[in-house]
Image (cartoon, grey):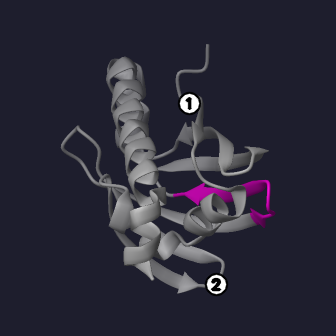
Amino acid sequence: MDLLTYRFSSTFTLEAPRNRVHDVLIDLEFYADWWPQVRAVAKIDDDHALVVCRSTLPYDLELELSAVRRDADLLEVGIDGPIRGWARYHLDEQGPGSTSLRFEQEVRAEAPMFVVASYVARPLLVWNHHRMMVGSEQGLRARLQPSAEVSAS
């Protein structure tokens, strides 16, 4: 087993049309508005941004995200920093006003601190990521509520 590589996947259904979900997910600059664990986003250009994340464990994770795909049914970013890899959102319209969202991520620990942590505290890092993704799902659901559309306009 490669202790330095992490693979994550989760699927849930959102009560919003696919184009609305897509619009929220593609707008990386505003992730910090709805995703509590995304602490800051700085746009570099149309395809690149610096993102600071902090979940439950007391450390900030600074990453550079690079747009790879922006299709209606697939959003993908490359991830660089102390961890490197990719993240994808698969969007599948389930009918009027409902979207299945599947999140996938594969990253590899690169920075010495994350390499060591992968050997001594891997379950804790996986748990920390899970907490971050729970925050993402909850924040995304709140952002997509009909009342959020009106207040965001």
Q: Residue 119 at x, y = what percent?
A: 40, 21
Q: Is residue 137 visible?
A: yes
Q: Which residues are magenta?
A: 69-80
Task: Report the predominant secondary structure element of the magenta stretch.
Answer: strand
**Residue bearing mark 2:** 46
Q: Residue at x 22, y 38 (%)?
A: 57
Residue at point 59%, 76% (across, down): 48
Location of residue 153 in the rendering, given as x and y in whole percent from the top left corner: 45, 83
Quarter the N terminus occupies: top right
Q: CA distance from mark 2 to mark 1?
A: 28 Å
Q: Is residue 66 magenta?
A: no
CA neighbours of label 1 inside 10 A, class few (<14), some (14 to 19), many (20+): some
Query: The residue tagged with tag 2: helix, strand or loop?
Result: loop
Instruction: Judge whether 54 appears above or below 120 on screen.
Output: below
**Residue 120 falls in image quadrant:** top left
Residue 89 screen position, x and y as percent: 67, 48
- Residue furthest left in the image: 58
Is residue 23 positioned above or below 128 on the image?
Answer: below
- Image coordinates of residue 146 in percent, x first then y, are 47, 61
Instruction: Say which residue label 1 marks.
Output: 6
Q: Is residue 102 above or below residue 65?
A: above
| Three-letter amino acid code at the position of disc 2 | Asp
